[in-house]
Amino acid sequence: MEPIIKIIKSASLATIVDKLKGRYPRLYAPVKKQELVELEVINGFNDIAQDYLLTTQSVKKLAFPRVEKILDYTLQKGNIQQQSPDTSNFPETVLFGIRPCDASGFRSLTAIFNGDKPDEFYKSRYEKLIIISFACNKADAYCFCTSVGGNPGNTEGSDIQFTPVDNDEMLVEILTEKGKAVADLFSDLLSDCDKPVDKQAYLANVPVVFDVNKVIDNTTKSFNNEMLWINQSLRCIGCGACAFVCPTCACFDIQDEQNMKQGARLRLWDSCGFSLFTLHTSGHNPRHIQSHRWRQRLMHKFSYMPEQLKVVGCEGCGRCSRACPVDMNIKEHLLQIAEL
Amino acid sequence: MENQEFEPKIVAFVCNWCTYAGADLTGTSRIKYGANVKIIRFPCTGRIDFMLLMKAFENGADGIIISGCHPNDCHYSTGNFHARRRWVVFRNLLNFSGIDTERIQFSWVSAAEGFKWADVVNNTIEKVRALGPYENYKKINVPTLFAKEDNNE
Amino acid sequence: MARVGVFVCHCGENISATVDCEKVAKESGDLNSVVFSTDYKYMCSDPGQTLIKEAIKEHKLDRVVVAACSPRMHEPTFRKACSEAGMNPYLCEMANIREHCSWVHPKSEETTAKAGDLVRTIVEKVKKNKPLQAIKVPITKTAIVIGGGVAGIQSALDIANCGHKVIMVEKQPSIGGHMSQLSETFPTLDCSQCILTPRMVEVAQHPNITLYTYAEIESVDGFIGNFKVKIRRKSKSLDENLCTGCGLCTTKCPKKKIPNEFERGLGNRTAIYVPFPQAVPNKPVIDRENCNYYQKGTCKVCEKVCPVQAIRFDQEDQIIEVEAGALVVCTGFDVLKPNFFPEYGYGKYKDVIDGLQFERLASASGPTKGEIRRPSDGEIPKKIVFIACAGSRDPAKGIEYCSKICCMYTAKHAMLYKHKVHDGTPYVFYMDIRAGGKMYEEFVRRAIVEDDTKYIRGRVSTVFERNGKLIVRGADTLMGAQPVEIEADMVVLASAGVSNPDSEELAQRLHVSYDAYKFFAEAHPKLKPVETNTAGIFLAGACQAPKDIPESVAAASGAAVKVAALFSNSELTREPVVAEVNRQAPPVFSTCTGCFLCEKVCPYQAIEREEIKDRNGNVIKTLARINKGLCQGCGTCVALCRVKAIDLHGFSNQQMYSEVMALLNF
Amino acid sequence: MSDILINKVKQLLSDKAIDIFIGHGEGTGGRIRPIFVRTPEDAEQLIFNENCKQSWANYLLKPEVKAAGKIGMMATKHALRAMMQLASEFQIKDNEVLALYWDNNELKSSADFKEIEAYLASQNHDILPHEQEMIDKLNAMTTQERWDFWQKEYEKCIKCYACRSACPMCYCHHCAAEGNQPQWIPVASHQLGNMDWHLMRAMHLSGRCINCGACAKVCPMHIPLNLLTYNLITPIQQEFGAIAGMKHDATYALSTFKTEDKENFIL
Amino acid sequence: MENKNIYEPYMMRIAKITDEAPFVKTFRLEFVNPQDAENFSFHTGQFGEYSVYGEGESTFCIASPHTRKGYIECTFRQAGRVTGELASLEVGDSMGFRGPYGNIFPVEEWKGKNLLFIAGGIALPPMRSVIWTCLDTRENFKDVTILYGAKSVNDLVYKHELKEWEERPDVKLVTTVDPGGETPEWKGEVGFVPTVLDNMKPNPENTIAIVCGPPVMIKFTFPVLEKAGFKDEQIYTTLENRMKCGLGKCGRCNVGKVFVCKDGPVFSRTQLKELPDEY
């Protein structure tokens, strides 16, 4: 649908939040928690963090939770009963105030989960998401969305996007039908945009660092460049922080838990950085050293996904680099690859 | 009122050579104690993995008894000394993590102390009964796994 | 799932009086994997066992749970029955619903429910049981006896007479130990040497005994049945095969004023010497520290006079390696050193001596030919004060224990003195008289009544010299702590028996534990008095604690029987409840990280290091490995191992985990 | 300070005394990151300033780093303690790793355990005052308050295992958390799985933690994990007289015992 | 079926258990729900996720041929948590099966050719499916040769079927065990599979070689085939990597850009050569 452009007073945000909350109890927004900014269900506008760059974790957990039950069963003697969890009744959920790079991150997840044989759990959860993003008016040294095809005002994946502009006003872009339905809740607060607004002027400046196509070409070519991967990953300690905060990392593990009466099969986040990720029971490990696992991470995002799913598996949010215990700034590494 | 009805679940982790034998003697002497306590036999207190104690609470134990040979009486000469050190550390950790160490009773009960075993058991039952059911664990365990409603973030 | 059979025993009425056994059996039939369950009046009876055996066959059971009495009672019975039915015996477990349930709870629903819980717990455990095989360890049928005192001699002879080889290792040039130093022995007053020397000779001549004197244990490796022991044979500077023991060298040696250890310094010896005339072997050694040749480079008189050219000045210590199946440690004790008693003037006044010195004075072969004469001037003392508990039972001296033999030998000393010096007066200061033992109390009585020994109950505070007399000042607690002062000609201290100065080092070499006083520790003070916590190493005599001769001899025979019993089979069969460090295919090899924190935690030194090498012989990993021969299955290492690389057969992580889960869920 | 360090490392590398040097480098936006220097030229990137408090001892056992040859390391006090503790657990040998460290503004280098021990003995190893304050604050709470405090923290955990990866003492190649027979620690990062993991890790580090604080510093969810292990340092020191990482041949506090160990809590 | 949970397994019942070798068992599984049995079909080469309720899932190929309907078989070695639990199941017990996943052996393309099957150790199961498929339609193929090796006589799986193949006049079976693994009664070859293969002097003419075994065996077998004149397109193998979903989503089984679970597990050597060494 053609975006509808409106203007709203920043001061009305609180009212909007109240209205949204009244209609959608599951209203998620960034909340400041000491050093963290977490996406949580809020009770009112005052809960929302005032000044934040990004949430510490990505928003993927709302469609692809840390722990998802994918099968229920009972374990009575001679009578095992299994039941798939009901995916039809996931509640409608509003994500308010997330960033464009988060919203567009669902593109990768959707490509992975909904392609081929759709994953009902992801699909149903994602369908119930209403995404109201805020364009970025600031960025930090880790941000590089512009280098991977995004930008601080990217509307992809959002139902509605707010952009702070001058005079305590905000630009409102209503982008989808779903967004329109939501915007009807506060249509009285919206005013028409009488003159064109140069949205770009109000956005953060995120310089383009590298050419993503170069990265794609060069990663694909560099599979056997062992020294490249070793040098890049020598300081990698093999934790899963990058993958877990990443908005597009979708690798998962399946595990059972039980208490002898009943059990559940769970789908859990996993990370290709863990040495156990590919370890065979025999002890053989196809990716036996960290450099191979680092290679897998980059290859997956910048070679395999573009080729097979036609999406770059990276939004340039820089979360992985911020979370990295040893400051592996992915931007630098990609730049190095682009310049090969 | 509710607490009067409450029958705590208590697991006893005991060594084979002293406390298990001591508990056998309690039986042979027909000394009575509460049926809430169920014994798991280990070769030695040194074998008792702290993870098992954590698992006991997780799976609904309201109290735990750990008992072995008196110092210097260990069948394996030093297993109980090693166990004792671990308990010092483990108790400290549990306490620091907010896990109620009042619910864990450590004791030395020899093969000759049939009466003492009954006392330890009965006292522990009383103590745990007074503390009530261990709700903390029940709150975090059950909902995450087996609840029907959607608990995901 | 596994096919588990549950057998619930009524034990007559013992269980069924309070537990509804039928209900327990019926409900356990509903448990996962249980394919058969029943109850019976007496499971341990013949028909009961037959019931189990037939059920195993009929229902193709591969696991059995017997809910009955304590496994400490009947586990072997039922395991044997299962084994007879073709099942691996270690797949049978017992649920204790008698001692831990029916006998301690009243008849009630809860009691029956508890029995059900216990059965369920054991069912879950047994499902994780793995078939185990009893461990067989070959046995080298040679025993090493360390120490050639009376205990060692007894032990060696007993073992040798059972037809097994014995290697005796003695630190001194001669066997005989402290007993050879004694004059007469209580309570019979028979001559110590008269009864000992024939046995010493027997040791030397026994075809099954190899004797290494002047030798020490260098190292002990291996485990029960399979020890590898290195023995250091200190150089005697002598070719023993040539030496005839004529003694010419000892008479010609120019160094004649060396205090004789055997005489406790009351006599002298030469640099090349035989410690005492009845020594076995009766061949000299050169004391290099006192030998002119070794110290100054010239002399060699002994070499010159030796009719058979047996002297070897360039002889070096020799290390020999032997294999043995068992060790008997009989290293004996020492007497508390004199510097412990500044208040008693030991070392300051020549006439203050210790009990062993008195033995030498009283010995017919001693420096005074058995006459009681003062070391200072050779006069016959008219008044002797014996001080019992010199050091013993004295926390201030760090010795809290009773040395046990002093009461008896002090009474003996007083008697001997009185028998030899009829007009003499013996006084004994004592704390308590401990004379438990056959004819012991009567013996002490005799010293008091017949030999008129003056027993004064009290401690001596000080001994000092005044006008050529030794003034013994103490208190008589039976007279209201009245001060007592005795002018004595001689004072004899019943010094505490202590462990040998090198006992700690030896214990560490043997990997046996020792107590705070460095005496070796027995595996169990009552039921395993001659065993150590290291399988295959036994103890006898005063190396455990002060003991008198009969006790030492009894322990020595006890230890010998243990050795003989061990040697009665060519293989040792052990319960397979042992720990194991997991092994995996390369490149992992094991989850063990090689931190070896488990090494020190093992009470049995069963954890060894295994080096994994690549094709070129480079070590790529060092992993822990459990020596099955040494491991006793306590599992202390299992609980310590961070990565759970160690597991204990019979009480594995899976088994214990399942027990906890099963007990609490449902 | 950086210049002295750079010159020293240049010399070491050109003398072939070491093949690879692990040091501090300038990271994004003033962060400090580990850098690996293999040539004298690269040594120019090394820095050392008051912000360089990180220990890189967790790299000493990394296969790729070990494969580079003889390792040199800019070692903080904590890194040196980590080395000693690793040595006591037979993970590194004497003269295997060349440690550079500042002793009163003098750059010293040593691969000798005895020398390092002597230096460590002269240093203060107390945990920082604000950390102690936090521990005291927690200990002053009621048990229930502590439970609530930690549950809130555990809830945040995403089980990325950065704490484990950054810890110099978490070198097991197969962590117990990954053992699944039985599954001691639920793999899922739900509250229970998280609590199990953190308690187990704390227990495994008791008596081995060298209070470098890496676990808490690297936690992307800012969980004060170091408090769990720090809290055990004092009791272990008081009860058993053991401090981790001071001696290369120290006996692990839980591998040994004294007959007179505390037992006032045992009936 | 619209909202089908892709992770929900078919409920299966164990119909038969065969002990093959120490720690190796074969299960015959039948669908609990007859509807499932009817709707289910697979083709040789495919695999599935087998699950024990309460313990988890494990990946093995389907070891029975698609020419035999109504059941599937799997053979597994007891190694980890899931296979350990599987091994304790009994006839009549329930378990889960998710699948079939992956691609297939292009048996249709092989019609009229000679077939040379080369398998080692526990890798015979994936081969067994295709062997039986071919033997069940024996008339479609020319010579069929099977070379199978294991560590020791005891470790040979499908002993009864080996015997059956041995006795068939239209199959040439060569079995071998590693040196040291033979028993006094052993009548087969002694030596490693590649060596024995070399000695057999295989004729590449109009022949397809299907190789399956541990990575080391595969690595040493390819050169032998190459030496004998086999072209890359004449050689097929099937790969195994750690898998969780079987659907190309969980992200762990890829070899380069290729997901073993979706694009494999069957690869010709031509395809394999394009893949990086990540298996």
Image: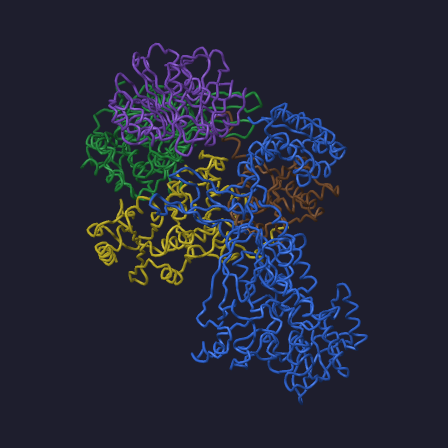
Chain colours: A green, B brown, C blue, D yellow, E purple
* Residue A2 in the figure: left or right of residue B121: left
* Residue C364 in the figure: left or right of residue A244: right
Vertical comparison of D57 with C285: above or below: above
Picture coordinates of residue E108, whole percent (x, y) = 31, 12
Picture coordinates of residue A182, whole percent (x, y) = 36, 22
Quarter where residue A298 is shown: top left
Quarter where residue A49 is shown: top left
Q: Residue furthest left?
A: A339
Q: Residue furthest bottom?
A: C467
Locate the N terminus of chain D by quadrant. bottom left
**Viewer-nearest residue: A121 or A80:** A80
| Residue A327, visible in the rendered structure | yes
Picture coordinates of residue B45, whole percent (x, y) = 58, 46
Picture coordinates of residue A9, whole percent (x, y) = 31, 30
**Residue appearing at x 57%, y 21% in the figure:** A78
Vertical comparison of D76 with E241: above or below: below
| Residue A63, visible in the rendered structure | no
**Viewer-nearest residue: C234 or B4:** C234
Vertical comparison of C245 with E76: above or below: below
Quarter where residue C481 is shown: bottom right
**Viewer-nearest residue: E273 or C660:** E273
